[in-house]
Image: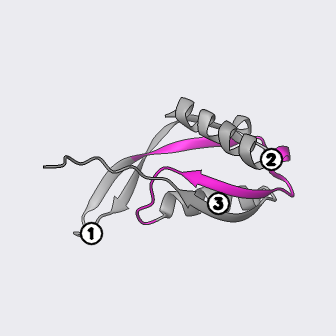
Amino acid sequence: NQLRYKSFCHRVCELTGAENGYEHVRVCGERKTIHDNRKNEDEVRKANVVEFDEPFFDNKMVLVFDDVITKGLSYAKYANQLERLGACVIGGMFLARTHYKVR
């Protein structure tokens, strides 16, 4: 997953001239979280622990890429973390891929 994101970010920045922030974010582990699912039962999931190069994001305009959007909670948390560091998150792009068999 990290190699895919690294290549994707590099290519987007190459085509747009944007500054690549990929090297300034590090996923350094996982922790368990409890989410309410649709049946109102507690569900335990793993969430990434992320470290940021804080000075890099100060006064930057940031577009966040994520691979899926469901409720948007992980995106919202990530965007809030960046904004606390002084970044201006201008939006999110959510990438998805659907696999299906054609009959």
- Which is nearer the eye, 11 or 33? 11
Q: Nearer the viewer, mark 3 or mark 2?
A: 2
Res 38 label: 1
Residue sitting at 43 percent across and 52 percent down? 96
Q: Residues within 10 Å of mark 1 (few under 14, many from 20)?
A: few
Amino acid under disc 1? Arg
Measuring from the top left, give residue 59's x and y in whole percent. 87, 58
Compared to residue 52, the image places residue 78 above or below, namely: below
Residue at numbered disc 2? 17
Residue sitting at 37 percent across and 60 percent down? 35
Residue at numbered disc 3? 79
CA gap between label 1 and label 3 equals: 24 Å
Specify which label sits upstream in the sequence, 3 or 2: 2
Measuring from the top left, give residue 97's x and y in whole percent. 39, 49
Amino acid under disc 3? Ala
Is 40 on the left or on the right of 26, as rendered?
Answer: left
